[in-house]
Image (tube, grey):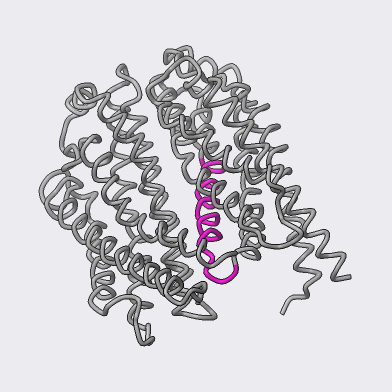
Amino acid sequence: MMSNRLSLRYQLLSAHCGVGFALLYAIFWVGFGHNLPPMASPDLNASALAAVYAQNRQSILFGDSMAALVGVLWIPWTAQLAVAIKRIEGEASVLTYINLLGGALTAWVVVFVPAIWVTAAFRDDMPPDIVRAINDLGFILFNLTYAGTSLQAFAAGAAGFADPRAKKLFPRWVNWWAILTGLSFVPITAMPFFKTGPFAWNGLVTFWIGFLTFFVWCCSMGICMAREAKGLLRQAA
Amino acid sequence: MDTRISLKWQWWAAASGILFEITYAIFYGYFGHNLPPVSASLSAADLASFYAANHVSILFGESMAAFVGILWVPWTAQLTAVMLRIEGETPMLTLVQLIGGILTAWVVVFCPSIWAACAFRTDSDANTLRGINDLGYIMFNITYMGTTLQAVAAGIVGLADKSAQPLFPRWVSWLAIVAGLSFIPITIMPFFKSGPWSWSGSINFWAWFGTYFAWITTMSWCMTADVGRRLSQGVRFGRPALAE
């Protein structure tokens, strides 16, 4: 079997992927992808939207291609979350598997949807109606499928609350924040009915609140897991 | 973690199979106008007017379907937990089931989002709309193999359960295997735009949703009963029930 110390080093690295993901995704998807808030607003007409892509083609192609790469950091982070909450849950670990499944679906979203926007930016001679339809498809898939991420956050928070050990994995506020994050996405189900305002995909609720809770959640749990892995490494020394 | 709390979570996870069927039938089936789905043989203009005529209902139904479809995740998680108990170490079939479950969850959550994208605007180009609608139905159907693997793996492990009180009766395990295999003819779906083999047809839609739902109902029921038994044993003896 693999040595305990080596395994813990991988666990530490995986835990750091939470903060790593938040930083790199902010740089590439948000920054280079022109998503602060998304410039490809749902209320643009087809030719105005095609113009957004035309004017920022290289930046969007670069940002979303890189986002498809760094988005995969969600996988090691989810794997470490599974290992850490499995230690709490013990044998019949349904919350661990819910986290794992929800994490796999979230990884799909953060990796594959940027590839859809890359498709929208790929050619400069595409009819504007088709660019807009592909852009819509991307933003709707990105947002409306939040429920996997919500379940992952709920499972992590519920396991955190049930932690019976003296030295708990997560402080209570981190567990509450995870639950709050999962709940904060729920209004996104109404997003397809709006092209402007807080519920639109570039609006206050769907974009700003949703991303704030999401990034704080993955950073806070990532930092706590890294702390636990460091403690276990010291013990193993 | 406290065994009773764990068992309560497990009960909800087991029941989410049946909850999935009910809510998915309401939102995807009824509000999404999928009983049966819109025909693959419509012209682009006719399909666009179908979406225009049912714009709000489809948008609502598919947005909600993307929400309730996620119930597939806890259900698969509970199936994983019980299969692991039967399969023990080296749980290859349990992992096959888990991966099949992830892919099935993708289908039941993400395809409704594709149809929501079709219904998002009322001024979409009709040919583009039909292209995306096709994409949704073809991804929904010809990717059944993940679900097939999930069902067949669950059935094989169910049959291998040699405990005194097996989790699944033998017929439930066989039903899972039959349901999984029943999807195989869907592979020829893209060759048909009308008739029983098309995505709205009597075989490809009605028959396979029948076997699919029969599989979920029976396994979900058995897993709920199993957790209920464990919970009540704990109460009767005045101590937490054994987790394993």
Nearest the camera: B186 or A173?
A173
Q: Is residue A97 magenta?
A: yes
Q: Is residue A131 above or below residue A219?
A: above
Q: Residue at x 50, y 49 (%)?
A: A105
Magenta-colored span: A90-112
Nearest the camera: B198 or B229?
B229
Give residue B233's position: percent from left, percent from top.
Answer: 42, 75
Give residue A225's position: percent from left, percent from top.
Answer: 73, 54
Q: Quadrant of the N terminus of chain B?
A: bottom right
Q: Is residue A203 above or below residue A189?
A: above
Q: Is residue B198 magenta?
A: no
Q: Residue at x 34, y 47 (%)?
A: B139
Nearest the camera: B117 or A173?
A173
Q: Residue at x 49, y 39 (%)?
A: A146
Q: Is residue A10 above or below residue B164?
A: above
> Is the magenta region chiefly helix, strand or loop?
helix
B107 left or right of A98 in image? left
Q: Quadrant of residue A127?
A: top left
Give residue B80's position: percent from left, percent from top.
Answer: 45, 67
